[in-house]
Structure formats: C-alpha cells, structure tokens
Amino acid sequence: MNHMINCPKCSSEVLVETPALGNIPLDVCPGCSGIWFEKGELEALLKQSQGGGSADLELINPKAEGLACPSCKTKMSHGGLVNPLLLVDKCQSCGGIWLDARELDLVKKLLGLSGGDSGVKVARPAAVPAAPPARDVKTILIKLAAAVGAVAGLLGV
C-alpha cells in the first residue's frame, strides 16, 4: 500500500512508513517526528502493551480546531486522549490520530510503557543512512529482547 501522506504540520514533508512499533507500520514525519496512526493502529498498539485490554480512544473535551487530516483532509478535533493533559489531533471522520513526537512520550508514560527509544526517527527515503557504529552483538541481542518485551519497543530506526 504505497500512499503518499503529507505531514499535517510540515506541509512539504511526506510521511515515511516505518515498522516502528511491533508489527504496526506507522507513518512518521522525517521533519518533526510526528506520527500518524490510521484508525485502529493506536488501539492495536495499546492492546499489545496492555495485554489485550480495550483502549478507549474517544477524545476528552474535543475542540474542532485541530490540523487538517493527512488522510481525508477533514479538519481534525483537538482534545485529550486517555488523559485530559495529553492533547492530540483526531479525525472524527476517518478515525486517524496524529501525535506530535513528544505526545508519543506522554502516551507511553500514561500507559506505563517503558523500554525502547523515546522517539521514532526516520530518515527521508532519499537519504543514504550512515553505517551504524559496530556494537557488541550480545548487547544488541539483549537490547532487542528487552525492547521486544517492552512493547516491541519504539526501536530507533
């Protein structure tokens, strides 16, 4: 599914799909590191992290002053998610949710998620990634196991 979605904040940026959390492909902005969750993706992630509980993702005190939805271009509602202090943009029409980079941190704190990198960073597809410094394989395996155990952790890409 190769759909071009523009970042609702950085109009010139196109979101890059990255299998960042578990097996859920997320659309991440290489400019601001915000993340677009299509309907069901954030719910699936919360289910994974909470061992199958259902997550209530209705916005608390939503106000119709959010960004334009990157998927269907409707104006999103801005409101609290899970907690009135965690303000996110949610499209009431297609169900997508936009999290700024720091809001993802808050979601993880609120849900008691730990492990993994605190942000998902992606490179623009044209950029050639620098070779990672060689690390001790054992350390990497331990980190991987810890990350997978945590939430199939926001692995830094």
Image (cartoon, rainbow, N blue to C red):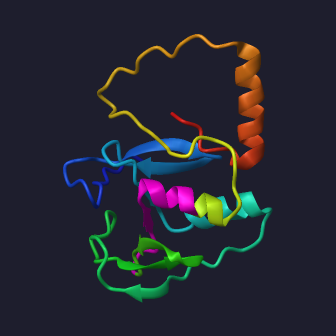
Question: Residue placed farthest to the left in the image?
Answer: 12
Where's residue 50, x and y in %?
76, 63
Q: Quadrant of residue 127?
A: top left
Q: Of residues 3 and 16, which is closer to you in this image?
A: 16
Q: Quadrant of residue 123?
A: top left
Q: For the magenta stretch, what is the residue range?
A: 93-106
On screen, residue 131 versus residue 23, left or right, reads left
Q: Which residue is at 41% across, 81% downward?
A: 92
Q: Of residues 47 and 94, which is closer to you in this image?
A: 47
Above or below, comparing residue 66 to residue 127 in the picture:
below
On screen, residue 9 versus residue 107, left or right, reads left
Above or below, comparing residue 84 to residue 129 in the picture:
below
Magenta stretch holds residue 104: yes
Q: Which residue is at 34% across, 32% downward?
A: 125
Above or below, comparing residue 21 to residue 49 in the picture:
above
How many numbered discs sit on the rendered protein? Answer: 0
Q: Which residue is at 47% across, 63% downward?
A: 38
Q: Which residue is at 48% across, 61% downward?
A: 103
Q: Of residues 72 and 55, which is closer to you in this image?
A: 55
On screen, residue 64 versus residue 133, left or right, reads left
| Residue 99 seen by the camera | yes
| Residue 41 seen by the camera | no
Above or below, comparing residue 149 to residue 84 in the picture:
above
Magenta stretch holds residue 71: no
Q: Quadrant of residue 83?
A: bottom right
Where's residue 19, x and y in %?
55, 42
On screen, residue 108 versus residue 3, left or right, reads right
